[in-house]
Amino acid sequence: MTAWTWEYEGYDPAHERVRETLCTLGNGRFATRGALPECTADDVHYPGTYAAGCYNRLTSVVAGRQVENEDMVNLPNWLPLRFRTPDGAWLTPDTAPVLSHRQTLLLDAGLLERVTRYGLDGGRVLSVRQQRLVHMADPHLAALRTEFTVEGATTELDVEAALDGGVTNAGVRRYRSLEGRHLTHVHTGTIHPGTVWLRCRTRTSDIRIGMAARLSADAPVADLHEPPRALQRVTLVLEPGRTVTVDKTVAMHTSRDPAISDPLQTAVDRVTTAPGFEGLLESHATVWGQLWRRAEIDVPGEPGAILRLHLFHVLQTLSPHTADLDVGVPARGLHGEAYRGHIFWDELFVLPYLNLHFPEVSRALLHYRHRRLDRARAAARALGRRGALYPWQSGSDGREETQRLHLNPRSGRWLPDHSHLQHHVGSAIAYNVWQYCEASGDAEFLHTKGAEMLLQIARFWADSATWDESLGRHRIRGVVGPDEYHEAYPDAEAPGLDDNAYTNVTAAWVLARTLEVLRDHLPEPRRRELLERAALEEGELERWEDVSRTLHVPFHEGVISQFDGYGDLAELDWEGYRKRYDDIRRLDRILEAEGDTVNRYKASKQADVLMLGYLFSPGELQGLFHRLGHRLDERTWRRTVDHYMARTSHGSTLSGLVHGWILARARRSEAWVFCQEALRGDVADLQGGTTGEGIHLGAMAGTLDLVQRGLTGLETRAGSLWLDPVPLPELSSYGFSLQYQGHWGVRLRLGSGLLEVTVPPSDLPPIDVRLPDRTVGVEPGETSRLLLPD
């Protein structure tokens, strides 16, 4: 590992899935896992290619019930390229002697390189060097260069390349009992010598896929077809010490791509006119260089290297190419099949970073939510409520995609899944609308689509609140909070909890912020138009104001309760369970396998109440509680932090991120432990096998935002950049650039008690930088150096 490379030395089957995930290459439209091209899908390897927004719905029989699931589809595999000596077996690291093996991910150029030396009979050695790219300039192209060199004696080598349409979705072990055959009508053919094609479609969503491959070598290429594969074969004569090169160039289109009619013909045209490998690599590296400049981050040492890897994978999932698509934020990237490629609330951790670097991507991701506003309103109506209820898991069309059953691998039992009751996803969408508009200055979006979403989400919260005369408060009942472990009260017949503090406080924020937008931000003609279109009834806005001030926030023992009744739950024997199981991150599975339930205990999977300190600055959070009639002083917040720190198992990669963010201001001496947990979540596969199923995109983007906003206290508010840095001894010097309200390449650097702000030359107005003790205007073309208070 260096600042710009990620390297694996030696072949290790036990960790191959994780390596394949972390060596995935993509461009925001599609991505391909870092599997070795000579290996097929088995218990060690899993080649997978996924296109953003490409879903298909199938029905399976689970525990005697018919269950429908929508999955991000594993598309035809373009990678296969295998080789052997005549009459010998195909060479793979699992079947042939491996003398050495190295994989290197070159982050700056977006390139994956592997070098393997195979031992052949007669003392010969075959060296295989490959370079792979998924093109960032032309997002429909990919290429694989393979260089063969032999030592010892002249050797013939048979090489076979393929486009394989016989793939299934089988990358997640616990899903393998579910139907995974998404592709049908697979056909192959030859365009002209050296170039073949494959077409197919998804079984129910009827997405057409066209793929074409060009194989170039210093020998004749033979094309043949063994459906569902298009094959190309070439025989090479390798003389000792002389390298022979085979280049494979692939184009892929789907019927979801804009501005095309026939995916196959478009793919054929594209691969036919594509330049050679050197030309592709040059334009690919140029665009990667531009992306790195826009998203520049300068953090020293190992944390900086991991942050660059995280940024690399964020950009491969959500690049400027994504701005042309109707897609959301897949929680596990385009890197694997976990969570079935669904969109959760993870955009809450992703968009705040993108807002300040790629606002056009943030806007497109919010468009995805706006296009599904009608579906969200229908979901609310189905519950007898007004407004919009966004699904906890979303896919192609915005319906609720959350599974109704989930498998506990420890017990082997399929259990009811009530996570669709996490209605707080609506507040996450509203938060991102506001954050995007503050960072970008995009008044047009706020006045139109943004205001529409805010209004309907606020309307849902107001209509969900019921008045409790005995409390003198409004309540929101029957929900699940971010914790996810607690889905019901002990021994309750129905799922759902009352007055989840995170849900209620964020609902109050949505209501208050929407009222502010309607009152202060919308031009009067637009305000009137919006209210007419929404058909708001008389007194609705007054009710919103009332609910935003009277939602119940429960407390117990001087701390904020996770939900009403949380204080009555039993304490868990944390020490005993750690001794018995060592890793208790997935405490819910452990208890269920024992015949118990986590619903009985004060035990959380991840930050729930503490998420409030992640979303809101201390001042804003205190203001929210004041609006709700509570005094949230520093002592109460610290007690709350201490209480949940002692009762959280960190069964999510997001947990370390949020706790590190919170502790940087509440208990600084312990913050770095959790920051490291967030940084190492995927690179060390801390969740025990989950990384092999796909990256955790929210945690990766969140670590970038931890440096960008968490440690700097950066807020984009009221037309200014607000900064309130907290120094961590382990990360005392760092810098990054950002885009703010039209200013490109604003540079911030912190270190040694000094904040340096550089604004590039332009004809834009100066940027107001607000510190706790002063405000400074920084003109375009100027650098301001500010001493920070101790």
Image (cartoon, rainbow, N blue to C red):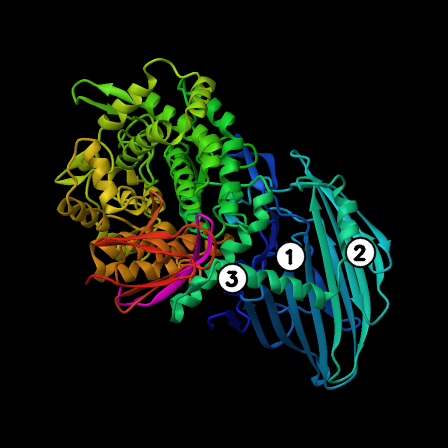
Part of the protein shown in magenta: 728-747
**Which kind of residue does numbered mark 1 sit on?**
Ala
Residue with the most extreme top position: 538
Which residue appears farthest toward the front when viewing the image? 763
Is residue 402 shown to the viewer in this render?
A: no
Pointer 3: what residue? 292
Task: Check residue 730 for magenta coloring.
Answer: yes
Q: Which residue is mark 1?
A: 137
Q: Quadrant of residue 684?
A: bottom left
Q: CA distance from mark 3 to mark 2?
A: 30 Å
Q: Main secondary structure of the magenta part?
A: strand
Residue 166 place in picture, x, y as percent: 70, 48
Q: Amino acid at mark 3?
A: Trp
Please name which of the two marks, 3 or 2, marks the residue nearer to the observer: 3
* Residue 272: image tag: 2
Per the rendering, the mark at residue 153 is none
Q: Decide which of tag 3 and tag 2 comes sooner along the chain.
A: 2
Crowd around label 1: few <14 · some 14–19 · many ≥20 (10 Å): some
Residue 645 image offset from top left, x and y in percent:
23, 50
Secondary structure beneath dot 3 equals: helix
Residue count near mark 2 (Cα–Cα under 10 Å), binned few <14, some 14–19, many ≥20: some
Which sits in the foreground, 525 or 495? 525
